[in-house]
Image: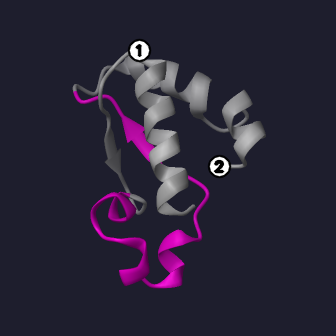
Amino acid sequence: MNREQLLHAIRAAASAINAHDVVVIGSQAILASIPEHQLPIEATRSIEADVMSRDGNASDADSIDAMVGELSMFHETHGY
């Protein structure tokens, strides 16, 4: 996943829960804070991003997973 793909996934996750922003955790969080060209290629190998609502609401997690998660239409369409 590159930075553009991560930003796309972030926007989709935020839209899934009708929020302006979400929190990115895990290994892909680095793509949101450091320019891609400054990172080793390994930083862009994952096709997953761990995203949650700002308050950690379980219902939001379910909505994000359904709309953007593995096996969702988003995932099938974009491959990440």
Q: Is residue 80 left or right of residue 56?
A: right
Query: Which residues lie in the magenta part?
Result: 29-54
Q: Residue furthest left?
A: 55
- At 72% across and 49% down in the image, what residue appears? 79
Please, what is the three-letter code of the amino acid marked with disc 2? Answer: Tyr
Which of the two labelled residues, at mark 1 and mark 2, occupies the earlier sequence position? 1
Marks 1 and 2 sit apart, C-alpha to C-alpha, by 22 Å
According to the picture, the residue beneath numbered tag 1 turns out to be 59
Residue 51 located within the stretch drawn in magenta: yes
Q: Is residue 30 left or right of residue 15?
A: left
According to the picture, the residue beneath numbered tag 2 turns out to be 80
Residue 19 at x, y = what percent?
33, 20
**Mark 1 element type:** helix
Residue 30 located within the stretch drawn in magenta: yes
Which residue is nearer to you in this view: 42 or 10? 10
Q: Is residue 52 above or below residue 45?
A: above
Q: Is residue 70 left or right of residue 43?
A: right
